[in-house]
Image (cartoon, rainbow, N blue to C red):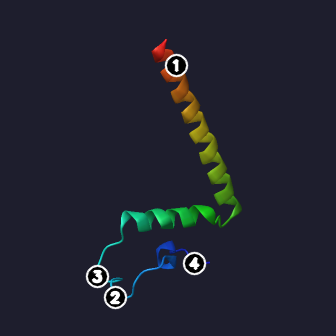
Amino acid sequence: MRKNYLRDLESSKSEQHSREASFLEYWQALRAFLRKPKTLFDLKDRSILLVLMLAVIILLQKVVEYVSN
């Protein structure tokens, strides 16, 4: 598997070298990377990230609830 996901995106041949990559292209490359886990460690890291994100969301909800009361 290739690691350079920006090359997987479709682009016109004439503009390929004359312009910088746009934010949309970087976003698409990030999404392609996140959809394709490479190793077991990637899966573990993503699951830890998911748990941490859920914990942050729950904490933010508790803080908003505390401040509103």
User: Label 3 crowding class (10 Å Cα cut-off): few <14, some 14-19, many 20+?
Assistant: few
Q: Earlier in the sequence, mark 4 or mark 2?
A: 4
Q: Quadrant of residue 36?
A: bottom right
Disc 4 to disc 3, C-alpha distance: 24 Å
Q: Mark 1, mark 4: which one is toward the viewer?
A: 1
Residue that numbered label 2 is attached to: 14
Q: Could you tell which of marks 1 and 4 lies nearer the N-terminus?
A: 4
Residue at x 64% of width, y 46% of height: 48
Q: Amino acid at mark 2?
A: Ser
Badge nearest the viewer, 4 or 3: 3
Q: Earlier in the sequence, mark 3 or mark 1?
A: 3
Q: What number is the disc on residue 65?
A: 1
What residue is at 42 percent from the left and 80 percent from the top? 11
Judging by the rendered image, the residue that carries numbered circle 3 is 18
Amino acid at the residue labelled 4: Arg
Could you say whether the residue bearing mark 1 is in a helix, strand or loop?
A: helix
Residue at (65, 67) in percent of width and height: 38
Q: Residue furthest left?
A: 18
Residue 49, labelled with which disc? none
Per the image, label 4 sits on a secondary structure element best described as: loop
Disc 3 and disc 2 in contact, CB within 8 angstroms: yes
Give how far apart the Cα atoms at labels 3 and 1 are: 51 Å
Q: Amino acid at mark 3?
A: Ser
C-alpha distance separating marks 1 and 4: 46 Å
Where residue 53 sits, quadrant-wise, is top right
**Picture layout, residue 57 above or below residue 12:** above
- Residue 2 is labelled as 4
- Residue at mark 4 to residue at mark 2: CA–CA distance: 23 Å
User: Of callouts 4 and 3, which one flags the residue occurring earlier in the amino acid sequence?
Assistant: 4
Mark 2 and 1 residues: CB-CB less than 8 Å, in contact? no
Which is in the foreground here, disc 4 or disc 2?
A: 2
- CA–CA distance between discs 2 and 1? 54 Å
